[in-house]
Image: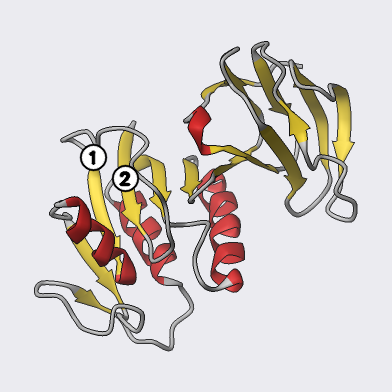
Amino acid sequence: MGKCVIFCAGEFDALLEDIPESALVIAADGGVRHTISLGLTPDVILGDFDSLGYTPEGAAVFPVEKDDTDAMLAIRHGLERGCREFVLYGGLDGPRLDHTIANLQALQFLADHGARGYLVGLRQIATAVTGETIRFPESAAGICSLFCLGEDASGVTVTGLQYPLRDGRLTSGFPLGVSNHFTGAPGTIGVKKGTVIALWDRENGLPERIPFVP
């Protein structure tokens, strides 16, 4: 599974792990600042550069008036290059809430295209869970919140957390899944149908993804 690492304009503390040499690295507009500070040379630089304020040499420039955000441009490029795992650094804690919401919707876009995505912010990581189960080790700690994205999510199963759930339903009209807690046991979150956005403390890293476990 090809990996794509995208640097967005939002904030994050540090890389979760070393970037594999085989990964496609994309700097989207203001994300260029992050690659400079990390000493990275991105494979692709793209965007309208209204956030960065200048156009880097060799960048693919897009108009400000367009349907895609710069992050979505990067995602589309990664999909075209065959990538199926995406990590978006700075995708959660940016200065504009509308772009954060757009990035959460982009997680659904990735799932719809057979890919998986993660948004990495200063304190939390987010992913979309649909037709699968994500699994955390017993060392996981802190808060884990679940939110339905779009139509109702059914067959939702949560184990190993303070508030378990078996074959439950989450809706976009009530925040039932907010502020659950890891308990020192292996934790799993499974969604049979629909999409759930899961958010957890970034110190826990990325979970294992396995086929849906009812």
Q: To which quarter of the image does residue 54 belong?
A: bottom left
Q: Mark 1 points at which residue?
A: 23
Q: Residue at x 68, y 11 (%)?
A: 185
Q: Which amino acid does label 1 sit on?
A: Ala
x and y, in percent, of residue 133 in the image: 64, 24
Q: How crowded is mark 1: few (under 14 residues within 10 Å), some or many (20 or more)?
A: some
Q: Is residue 74 left or right of residue 147?
A: left
Q: Residues within 10 Å of mark 2 (few under 14, many from 20)?
A: many
Between 144 and 130, which is closer to the camera in this rendering? Answer: 144
Q: Residue at x 56, y 47 (%)?
A: 112
Between 1 and 56, which is closer to the camera in this rendering? Answer: 56
Q: In which quarter of the image is the N terminus?
A: top left
* Numbered badge on residue 113: none
Q: Quadrant of the C terminus?
A: top right
Q: Is mark 1 on a helix, strand or loop?
A: loop
Label 2 vs 1, first from the N-terminus = 2
Q: What residue type is labelled 2?
A: Cys
x and y, in percent, of residue 211 in the image: 60, 19
The number of callouts visible is 2
In the image, residue 142 sits, relative to residue 92, either above or below, namely: above
Q: To which quarter of the image does residue 197 belong?
A: top right
Q: Mark 2 points at which residue?
A: 4
Q: Which residue is drawn at 43% across and 63% down?
A: 10
In the image, residue 88 sits, relative to residue 19, either above or below, namely: below
Q: In this view, does 147 lie to the left or right of 139?
A: right
Q: Is mark 2 on a helix, strand or loop?
A: strand
Are circles 2 and 1 on residues that touch, CB within 8 Å?
yes
How much space separates mark 2 and mark 1, taking CA atoms?
Answer: 6 Å
User: Looking at this rendering, what residue extends furthest in the left direction?
Assistant: 57
Q: In this view, does 203 lie to the left or right of 158?
A: left
